[in-house]
Every structure is written in structure tokens, then in C-alpha cells.
Image (cartoon, rainbow, N blue to C red):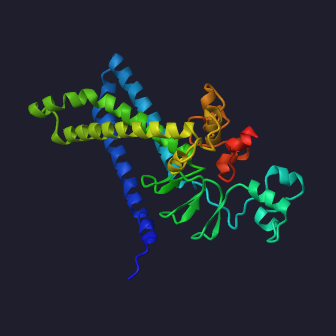
Amino acid sequence: MEINLFRFCSGLKALGYLMILLVAAIIAVSYYAVVVLTWGPQLLRGGLQSFFAFSILIVFHILLILLLWSYFMVVFKDPGTVPENWKPVLDEENLEAGSSMPFSEHVAPEASASDSDVLERRPPVGYCSRCQNGKPPRCHHCSVCQRCVLKMDHHCVWVVNCVGARNYKFFLLFLIYTFLETTMVTLVLLPRFVKFFGDAKNHSTSPGNLAIIFLAFVLNLAFALSLLCFVVMHASLLSSNTTSIEVYEKKRGVRWKYDLGKKKNFEQVAFSKIVFDALLNCFGAKKALWFFPLFSKEDLDKTPALRGIEFPTLANIEA
């Protein structure tokens, strides 16, 4: 009996749905430990203690809302699919010469010498035998989703979706806000965790509440440390305009052809034109949307990288 490994890969989606439930469970445990058991009761004490507790709870809820918003955007946003029957078009120079047809339709089998020159300038493009369709640059086939994804970074089992051209910003925000939230929960639960052993010895707190505080502290500490590694890794990838898949391709070259310098690299992910030149276009052109999992119409219209079909290269910039 022949085993289809690709069908097995598509079955990993079921694991992803369990991960969503796990995320919900961790958030519920953390919420109960921080709001109900630890800092919520401090609001009734009055004075500076109540103000401090109120400030902590406000920041906690703001980060939680941004975390969940970013998470659901990554889960439900299409990372980018190759248009049906997609074919590469000629470069600007040939378009100005009057050739507006896709290259694969324009060049005849008995191409002349001049046509051969055009062929050498044609951007590299692949073909996916499973999708029976063309593959734009930086596009890869996902065996789990069973389709080609534009500028695919990786398939994330935590969001049951691929991370690609059109939801990478949301994924980065999800990483950042989750790191900030888990770090904050770890810090605000630290005093109660220190008292954990004394409370357990004196039986001053119910065993159930002690277990929740202990579990919430340990889980958030573990996630904060692991997420720090992911945030640093993706910041490094972003600075060189590289996806997780392209890391191995990049090692083979002297200089990565999509590395246009830190300023222009950040422009392609679409953040905003404010504060630091390195973050100029990292997540969009509107500074009001910098920290939110949204794209402005201007971003979608004027940022080719978000469409996932065309990408400027070092050769184009230096030409």
C-alpha cells in the first residue's frame, strides 16, 4: 500500500486546532491568576496600592487585547495565494518598448538572438507541479496547507496557518505582544510566587489557588524566555530581508540579493515612516497603524512586497 506523506502533512492541521485551545487555556489561567487572585482584590484596599493595581490591570488588558487581535489576524488572514494561471510579465524596459504580454506568451519557440537577450534578463520563476501553476520569486509550496504561499516564511502550527507576505506583520506583532504580556505576567506574579512556599506551608491559601498561581508563573516565564529567542531571530531575519526558509539559500551566496540595506528591508514588511529610519516602512505608511494588526489602503496599493509577487533586488537597485 502506497503511503502519501503529503496527506499526512495536511493532517497536521488537526494538531493546530489543539494548539489554539492550548493558547486559550494559557490565557485563561494567566487571567485568573493576575486579575482574580492577585491584583483584582488590591483595588479594594484604597490609596497607592489600589492605584498601582489599577495601572497594572490596565496595561495587562491593553496588551491582552492587542495580543488576541494580532493572533486572530494571523489565524484568519490569507498569507497570499498565487493567482490562477499566473505568469511573469516583462520588465519595465520591455513594457515601454510595447510588449505588455506575459513573457511565456510573448517569446516564440523560434526566438531570435535579441529575444534570447530578453530571456536572460527575465526574473527567475519556478513552476509548482502539485499546484499546476507558476511560482513567483520567494514563493513556496506548503505541504500542510496543500498550496503555494507568497513569500512563505513557515507554517505555524500555533496559528493553523502559513506565515507569508500578507500576514507576516501580524505574526511579528503577535510575537512582540505575547512576549510583552508573558514578561509582564511573570513580573507581577513574582511576589506571589515567592510567597508560594510559605502559603503552602501555612495553608493560608487554598491549594487550588496556589496551583493556579504556580502554573501561571511557570508557564509565562517559559514562554517569555522562548519568545525572546523568536523575537531576536525574526528581528535578524527582518534586518536582512530574509524569510526562515531562505536562510539556507542565503548562506550559499556572497550577498543575499533581496538584502537592500536595513532601511529598505523594513520598508517591504510595511510598518510606518516615523521615529527610526530602520523602521521606516516596516509595518505600513500610516504611523497611527504602526502598532496595530492592520494595513492602510496606501500600504496595499503602494507596497509591492505585500502583494507577494514582485520584489526589488540588489541588482535592480544598483542598476
- Let me know if residue 40 appears in the view: no
Q: Which residue is located at x 34 percent, y 45 percent?
A: 26
- Let me know if residue 34 appears in the view: yes
Residue 49 vs residue 161, the one in the foreground: 161
Q: Which residue is located at x 61 percent, y 41 percent?
A: 269
Instruction: Quarter of the image for the N terminus: give it.
Output: bottom left
Q: Is residue 126 above or below residue 39?
A: below
Q: Which residue is located at x 84 percent, y 54 percent?
A: 94
Q: Residue furthest bottom?
A: 1
Instruction: Quarter of the image for the C terminus: give it.
Output: top right
Residue 125, percent from left and from top: 67, 59
Residue 43 vs residue 260, the one in the foreground: 260
Q: Is residue 34 above or below residue 125?
A: above
- Taking the image as shown, residue 168 lies to the left or right of residue 183, namely right
Q: Which residue is located at x 28 percent, y 36 percent?
A: 217
Total numbered labels:
0
Residue 270, percent from left and from top: 63, 40
